[in-house]
Amino acid sequence: MTYIAKPKLHHPSLQPNALGFTRRDYEGRISTLCAGCGHDSISAAIVQACYELSIEPHRVAKMSGIGCSSKTPDYFLGQAHGFNSVHGRMPSVLTGAAMANRDLIYLGVSGDGDSASIGLGQFAHALRRGVNMVYICENNGVYGLTKGQFSATADAGAKSKSGEVHVDSAIDLISMALLLGASYVARSFSGDKKQLVPLIMGAIRHKGAAILDVISPCVTFNNHAGSTKSFDYVREHDEAVNAVDFVPARKEITADYEPGTTELVRQHDGSYLKLAKLRPDYDPSNRIAALAYLQEHQAQGELVTGLIYVAPEAADLHDHLGTADTPLNTLTEKELCPGAKALEVVNGEYR
Amino acid sequence: MTYIAKPKLHHPSLQPNALGFTRRDYEGRISTLCAGCGHDSISAAIVQACYELSIEPHRVAKMSGIGCSSKTPDYFLGQAHGFNSVHGRMPSVLTGAAMANRDLIYLGVSGDGDSASIGLGQFAHALRRGVNMVYICENNGVYGLTKGQFSATADAGAKSKSGEVHVDSAIDLISMALLLGASYVARSFSGDKKQLVPLIMGAIRHKGAAILDVISPCVTFNNHAGSTKSFDYVREHDEAVNAVDFVPARKEITADYEPGTTELVRQHDGSYLKLAKLRPDYDPSNRIAALAYLQEHQAQGELVTGLIYVAPEAADLHDHLGTADTPLNTLTEKELCPGAKALEVVNGEYR
Amino acid sequence: MRAITGPLAATNDFVVKFANINGSGSASANELFARSILRMGVPVASRNIFPSNIQGLPTWYEVRVSGEGWLGRRGGVDFMVALNPQTFDKDMASIEPGGYLLYDSTKPIPPEKFRPDITVLPIPLTEICNKAYADPRQRQLFKNIVYVGAMTSLLGMDLEAVKWLIAEQFESKPKLLAPNIQALGFGYEYARDRLKDRCKLKVKRQDKVGERIFIQGNNAAALGCVWAGATVCAWYPITPSTSLAENYNRHASRFRIDPVSKKKNFAFLQAEDEIAAIGMVVGASWNGARAFTATSGPGISLMSEIFGFAYYAEVPAVVFDVQRGGPSTGMPTRTQQSDLLLAAYASHGDTKHVLLFPEDPHECFDFAAAAFDLAERLQTPVFVMMDLDIGMNDWLVEPLSWDDTRRYDRGKVLSAEELEAGKTFGRYIDVDGDAVPYRTIPGTHPSQGAYFTRGSSHDAYARYSEEGATYVAGMQRLLRKFETAKSLVPKPAAREAKEKARFGVIYYGSTAVAMNEAVAVLEQKGLPLDLMRVRAFPFNDDVEAFIAAHEQVFVVEQNRDAQLMKLMVGECAIDPAKFLPILHFDGTPITARFIIKEIAARAGLAEAEAQEAAQ
Amino acid sequence: MRAITGPLAATNDFVVKFANINGSGSASANELFARSILRMGVPVASRNIFPSNIQGLPTWYEVRVSGEGWLGRRGGVDFMVALNPQTFDKDMASIEPGGYLLYDSTKPIPPEKFRPDITVLPIPLTEICNKAYADPRQRQLFKNIVYVGAMTSLLGMDLEAVKWLIAEQFESKPKLLAPNIQALGFGYEYARDRLKDRCKLKVKRQDKVGERIFIQGNNAAALGCVWAGATVCAWYPITPSTSLAENYNRHASRFRIDPVSKKKNFAFLQAEDEIAAIGMVVGASWNGARAFTATSGPGISLMSEIFGFAYYAEVPAVVFDVQRGGPSTGMPTRTQQSDLLLAAYASHGDTKHVLLFPEDPHECFDFAAAAFDLAERLQTPVFVMMDLDIGMNDWLVEPLSWDDTRRYDRGKVLSAEELEAGKTFGRYIDVDGDAVPYRTIPGTHPSQGAYFTRGSSHDAYARYSEEGATYVAGMQRLLRKFETAKSLVPKPAAREAKEKARFGVIYYGSTAVAMNEAVAVLEQKGLPLDLMRVRAFPFNDDVEAFIAAHEQVFVVEQNRDAQLMKLMVGECAIDPAKFLPILHFDGTPITARFIIKEIAARAGLAEAEAQEAAQ
Ligand SMILES: Cc1ncc(C[n+]2csc(CCOP(=O)(O)OP(=O)(O)O)c2C)c(N)n1
Ligand SMILES: Cc1ncc(C[n+]2csc(CCOP(=O)(O)OP(=O)(O)O)c2C)c(N)n1
Ligand code: SF4
Ligand code: SF4
Ligand SMILES: [Mg+2]
Ligand SMILES: [Mg+2]
């Protein structure tokens, strides 16, 4: 198969952002996913979020595992370096990359098989270390690329296309993330760009481990009646706790902010998350309450979406490691090599 | 090193149990752990529980990973087959063994490094499949066998022997187990045999995935001030939600059962768990409430112990798989081989 | 450049290739085409060439029609059904001079865009379907049946045979039967009426198929597992092994249901990854069940640690490695024989593993069954080294057979009675001098036979020991056990040339079909070759003798690094100078043409002869 | 049986062994003993033999005193300090005839229990300590110093040298100094007064140590990583590699602190397992940092999948494999060279990896530094193949050295300026003809140089491709890159015998010290041998030439399966018949005696000579 390069037709009506980039500059190669696949919508949302944030594409490192979902980093941000690793190991590769250069934006894309089945351990440990990243799990409840087997996020009772019923308990990545100390935890739906784009924007600007569980129907293998990850099912059961708006750092907070029903969360970099409270009793700053809320509502069959939890001042991996501010990958012999004299001192200590 | 066989001196005062076995018959080889290691107390509790339940030792399969904790199956139930697998993979080996023969008791012993670091994925998946087993994690917050590095259950803020402070979020295996669908979830302390023995007994009689997180201080590497897994620390912060008594199937329920403060849970095999409610508001049959309770109390620095959750009628792996009642490992050509005629039919389908 | 000849004319000897887009439903139509020819008694070999993707990318299906019964890929295409605009140019370019091109002429292509040396067969597939069907999905799907109909006419195939097959296919969905037959007719009639006599490739009824069946290796291996009494399958999806596990589940669900309880006399579990899958297999085997996993290269890499455990603790395990193009994710939907070194020496420390190399689906069935006997007899992992070509393509092979008097060899397992008899049991004692010890199954006896399985060094009683001499004794016994394995694994299949041959050829696995053809051609051209098809590692002494008996030995493999050759020189102490490696590793199945060309060139066959032979 | 001789008498040429119980604090006392002799200018070689356990099991510490400077294990024990009742009998049995036994005579053992052919040196250690100390922990700890004091007297060592070392040791804890000196005195005086002239083994001041340092290979390798500019270490604890990572953290915490912010110019992360560790290393290397991991066999097995990724996607990575006894958990606290085959061909598909074989801690430092240059120059994983013997024992080696003019070879990395200059960048284009392509680091340039790293098959621009020819071209370039590696890796170290030698000897790694001694002895006995110490895989052409130049070549290895030999026959096309493998694999470091005996026997040295040579 030869690669089909994407035609770079610049549409005259495309608005440039603050950096002068148009939306096209955030796109990648043409997707090879199935027509209608939820994952493509998420790619579009990523493009939109980066465009709106006026991110320099080359300051993003795109990392993924293996799966249909993990192919997608090739389909956005063509000017960013990408890393399509092996199945389930994106979190460790991303962690290593983040150690080497603390100054890039790390965007990890994974699937539910990649994250919850083979990769559960790495998923958990990356979160509990507070790696400064945006981790998006494109969750369709099946292994798309290997043709539709259940993944570990498939709900007990869900039916496969061939009629098989899933029996094991589902892994709820969002509840797990809350237990594991992630500091920005959100769930959304690939079909709800309005909700998804600002959540991604907030995650990019968040310092620390940000995880987005995005339900992303597999139109080929998991979009039938009986599936709990189909477009129809999600639309029917989606219960958003809040509606998020991202307000960049220097932008003024305008007046449409109604106290009581709207809440402002100031992030580390000075940007704000403006939360319209759709469930008035919901408080995304309380981890324990959020977890309880999720459990209760999910037990009732609701699919809770929105910004589930945020701790805007959490420490991240580099705080934990005590790494210096200069990216390690820019240091040279001068800073790195103690030199011959120091080695003579060391020799002396072993005589 | 040669192996030191244990002297089999039968103490005349040792009482035989219903099967005529004395406690000695449930012991194993002499431990090679450090004097005072918490793990040895857990071995003793296992011996006691099996003795009291009058289990035939050879009907138990002892499985473990790698670590000081994982060595212990050699130190109890000498008449049972043991399987000291590789680091972090006990759950899968146990699952396979359980698939082959549904009639044995599967006792998995692991450490916190084995279960929460390298083995987190297998830990989680074995629980969510409802493997019928007793899974004991001997949790000391460190890697004992490799000399005291922090494990993933070390609490954020805990100090190592050399003064290093742990920074990552701790993995709480019990909260995880609740999310993952384990049907018998308990936490205890190696120093509290009174609490631990009946919890093990209940777990053995439970049908489904039973997990015990047993805090088990490492006297050599994690028993100093600043540790949150030392004997002193655990004694000070231990908050039991209930006191469990195990009542075997055919035994009558005697009168010391005070309704309101005591609760009876009937298990699948007809045995009872008699729970003295130490925290009157605590309900171990409510998974969601249990999780919330744990989170709240642990956030206050309490170490919640006792029977955290039980679902006595949960389905187990074999229910999920639809396996026949006869252990697979006893089937012969007769049941297994469809034979030449059937193969001829199959051939016909591929012409 | 070859001279331009007239249109190719051949009966029962040509290659048809379908170029489609995946996810468009072409696969079953193409298979229908191949099976129809089989029904006419004419052997076919089919190869599915598909992308690592679900929908929208190029996919090809190659059908070699060979009255002579050659089942390997020949190389080249005589008749291209070019239905994918993305690859149209390339597909056209790949047609042999004088060949044929069928395309959807709904939007006709100007004649000057076609190669002058081929015959173009335009059929307005879209137009036909758009006229006949309203539903867009139907319009798409029936297009495939329409071109099969057209081919039926063009190649002079038996229309009734095709219809019959369609009828069988839709037996359970009778509603779909009529529209399919109708679509077939559309194509048939169009070609009959408009393209009459344009194609000189013909299929003619023969009687060369006989009792043979048309089956994929993964399916046959799965059947082998069921017949061999495997009760536990733990696996993780990975192309191209997935269908092995899934077929096991399907067949077991049919043949292994307890008649009374209707419950399953097997356990089928999709694990969370390959490490868990092999852990389960080892746990189940230790506990006395026949257990297996199926995977491909990445899975083998991940399982490495546990393979070493099973080797050293001596636990049986059966592993199907359906090899694909490596390294890393590599070419997941292409074929290769490139995991040999990894599998043979998998895991750290000194280890060696038993490998079997089936040549086709028939042998996949046999070796699957043999693998369980070997694994239990030898108490060690046994790898069945398949590949995508065998595993995922339908091959025409002798029917599967089973001898009802055959008994499973469960190896040296002590029963309660034997333990009761009171022989001292030591898990790792070499009682019989064949270096294979006795084992016990948990729960067998209340007081005899318990032991502690471990991957740490141990003595003959499975007790932990750090004593050097104890360790060495155990490791040397394992070497002797590998010697025992030599006498138990399938022997190589040898075939002597009619004349005395200077050269020997060693090969294995899916290469066999192409090799059979290549050798026949080379022999005709005056190059006699002795053949040895290696069927297992460790190598039987016959392999050494064969090599010794020849001046030079070609080793034909589908990998870059001559992995079998490396195993032979390392394990049999053979001078590598003896070997002439012939390596094909672009991910496509090796062809007879390739082998002929390489061997001819290196055997010094005159250039012209070689050229000719390779045609 | 050897004739019983009188008490052994020797100066600066004997072996002392301490038999202790682990966790009893003996390790630092034993090391004090060894270092004291070094301070007297007399070379020592020490070996710690410890169980896979924390407390209560037997442990030994062997000190070879060798005025001649032989640093391998000799074999045999001349002076046994037998302080472990569990192993007492065995320890006594292992003493050479005429040797010595020191024991704790608090509970005296009846004389008939001792071997008649040895000299018994009773010291009531417990009694002495119980008298002097009240605290039970002190009673236990000071026993160790007391026996060191006694040894100081018995062997005629320099008491001041010992005291001096103690003073250095307790510089930071002055309170502990006096009681230690006192305990030393107790032992010294007891032996001086009660055991005068009973021991004829003596240490005499020499000037044979010079500038050399006494250091463990893991520590030296860690220093190498710091000096070589490694900034990321991701690891998972496993014996015997743990101290490599921990020492890196220690040294980096000293030498790599940003002077202004006091923050770290390195990142040290204990991963959740080995798969994560290598994932992090690959991620960090891809992102332009020098990154490494340290592990042992089980870790290498687990990392296999990602090694294949790094090979195929061409990402640098440095991996220290401190080898231990395999397979599986095997003998975690014993030494072996048994991961060669695994490391060389790690992962599925066709792969080959660069290996380095340091002979001692000094070379561990050098090769650690070299490994980063090679990994970045070649864009591939590089394995530094150490073992427990080198890694966890203190070895006497030349001081570490660093040339301040040395610049790190960061390999072919395009800067923003170079990209700006507008050369077309293709990640996998072989621009320079050495098969090593150019890479870019993420974030370098806004619009040039971005590419998509993947383990799936790709073209020269890193784009996904399933095209066979594209794939093959890439794989063949990787083979050529491995050829380039040949010229970059450390060359083998050769040493010619004075006379013309029929036999060559090939060996590597920790075997060198024993080999040096063995060869000297064999040469004296009339068997000249040419030596080649292999220092890297792929093998330099010199290796082939060396083999060609000899009738027969001994290959001396510390594994069961002759793994280096297999690599040589497979990769260099050498006739295995040339090789005579000499294999030592019981987990203890190979001894000069063993090599002498084996070579002598197989080289046909007269039996008597051989016997004698082996003494
Ligand atoms: C080690 C390994 N095992 C198995 C596979 C095969 N495989 C490829 S993708 C995939 C599952 C992907 O599922 P998911 O992450 O949910 O992605 P989706 O395709 O659904 O987006 C599997 C099992 C592999 N590539 N590597
Ligand atoms: C694959 C692998 N990695 C690392 C090790 C080394 N190792 C042995 S035990 C252990 C940690 C054990 O910790 P834990 O499970 O908490 O047991 P504990 O000793 O504390 O009881 C490690 C890392 C190993 N044996 N195998
Ligand atoms: S198979 Fe499913 S997940 Fe994969 S591309 Fe198609 S719709 Fe998307
Ligand atoms: S090191 Fe710690 S965990 Fe291990 S045996 Fe000793 S006290 Fe127990
Ligand atoms: Mg998925
Ligand atoms: Mg632990």
Image: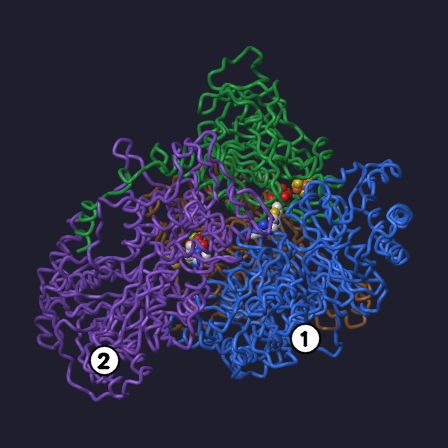
Chain colours: A green, B brown, C blue, D purple
Q: Amino acid at mark 1?
A: Tyr
Q: Residue C512 placed where, x, y %?
A: 65, 68
Quadrant location, ligand no. 3:
top right
Seen at 32% across and 52% down, the residue is D370
Mark closer to the observer (2, 1): 1
- Asked whether residue D492 appears in the rendered view, the answer is yes
Residue pointed to by mark 1: C408
Q: Amino acid at mark 2?
A: Glu
Residue pointed to by mark 2: D96
Please tell me whether mark 1 sits on a helix, a strand or a loop: loop
Could you tell me how many numbered marks the image carries?
2
Judging from the image, mark 2 belongs to the subunit labelled D
On the rendered image, what quadrant is the N terminus of chain B found in?
bottom left
Q: Residue A42 placed where, x, y %?
A: 61, 32
Please tell me whether mark 2 sits on a helix, a strand or a loop: strand
Closest to the observer, B224 or A282: A282
Q: Residue D201 placed where, x, y %?
A: 13, 75
- Asked whether residue C437 appears in the rendered view, the answer is no
